[in-house]
Image: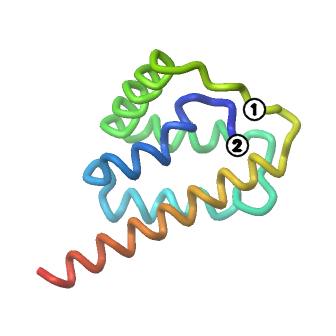
Amino acid sequence: MTSDPLLQALPVLLETKPELFSPNDLQDLLQTLAPLENNPPENADEILREWCKARRPIRDALRNLARDRAEVKKVKPSEPNDAKRITNFFQELSQQVKDKLEQQNQSQNKQ
C-alpha cells in the first residue's frame, strides 16, 4: 500500500467516478502501472502522482476525495519499508484498471 492519500484514493475514484477515465487514460494508466507491479522502484509513488497531475479532472477529483476521506477518518499510515504492500497496491490497481477498460469496451460494443 502507498502512504500517499492521493494515491490511496485512486482505486476509490476509479470505482465511483469511472466517467473521469477515458479509454486512453485507462490504457495509459495500465502502461504506467505495468513496470510498477512486480518490482516497484523507490519512486513508484512519484511516477503515479505525475500521471495523475497530467490529467487535471482526475487530479482535482482525487484531491477532493482524499480531503473528504481524511475528514471522515484518520487512515492508519502504512509501513514505509513494507515493499510487499506497495507491490500489492500496484497489482490491485492494475487489475482494477484492466477491469474498467474491459467494461468500457463491452459497453461500447453494445452500442
Q: Where does the C terminus fall, quadrant-wise? A: bottom left
Location of residue 25 by image quarter: bottom left
Horizontal relation, residue 40 to residue 73: left or right: right
Residue in the picture at 70% in, 43% down: 1
To which residue does mark 1 refer?
78
Q: Is residue 50 left or right of residue 2?
A: left
Q: Position of residue 19 (x, y in %)?
A: 25, 52
Between 54 and 77, the residue placed more toward the observer is 77
Q: Secondary structure at mark 2?
A: loop
The residue sitting at 57% across, 61% down in the picture is 94
Type of the residue with mark 1:
Ser
Q: Residue at x 44, y 65 (%)?
A: 27
In the structure shown, which secondary structural element does the residue marked by tag 1 occupy?
loop
Q: Residue at x 59, y 19 (%)?
A: 74
- Counting from the top left corner in percent of width and height, residue 70 is at 50, 20
Nearest the eye: 69 or 81: 69
> Label 2 near label 1: C-beta < 8 Å?
yes
Q: Which residue occupies the extreme left position in the image?
A: 111
Q: From the image, tell me which residue sits under label 2.
A: 1
Q: Earlier in the sequence, mark 1 or mark 2?
A: 2
Alpha carbon separation for disc pair 1 and 2: 7 Å
